[in-house]
Amino acid sequence: MEKKSQNCWDFMDCPEDHKNKCDAFKDNMGVECWLIFHSRGGCRGLEEGNDCTECLWYKKVNSIE
């Protein structure tokens, strides 16, 4: 599967209740979700103190291993 054909919530297997609260899901920004979270204070799914560059999805989309 091509990496840009998937959304973060699918890759992270987010439950429906989490997706319904997610700004990236609401704004259909599932491929580059860090762009919206960067401007809105960070991803709710990350542990406090981490940023999007620590996320497996960010690393996959940006080919960082």
Image: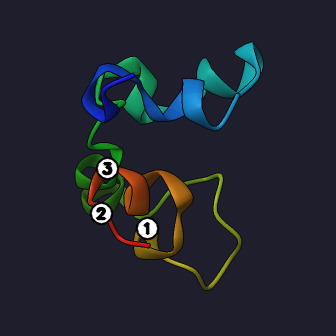
Please tell me how crowded label 3 is: few (under 14), some (14-19), or many (20+) other residues with Cα within 10 Å: some
Determine whether 21 is above or below 12 in the image.
Answer: above
> Which residue is rendered at x = 47% and y = 51% of the image?
57
Q: Residue furthest bottom?
A: 49
Give residue 30's quadrant in the image: top left
Q: Which residue is mark 3?
A: 61
Reading the chain from its start, which is encountered first: label 2 or label 1?
2
In the rendered structure, the answer to whether residue 58 lies left or right of residue 45 reads left
Determine whether 49 is above or below 60 in the image.
Answer: below
CB under 8 Å between discs 3 and 2: no
Q: Please, what is the three-letter code of the amino acid marked with disc 1?
A: Cys
CB under 8 Å between discs 2 and 1: yes
In the rendered structure, the answer to whether residue 2 lies left or right of residue 7 reads left
Q: CA distance from mark 3 to mark 2?
A: 16 Å
Give SS at disc 3. Answer: helix
Quadrant housing the C terminus: bottom left
Please tell me how crowded label 1 is: few (under 14), some (14-19), or many (20+) other residues with Cα within 10 Å: some
Circle nearer the viewer, 1 or 3: 3
Give the image's coloring scheme: rainbow
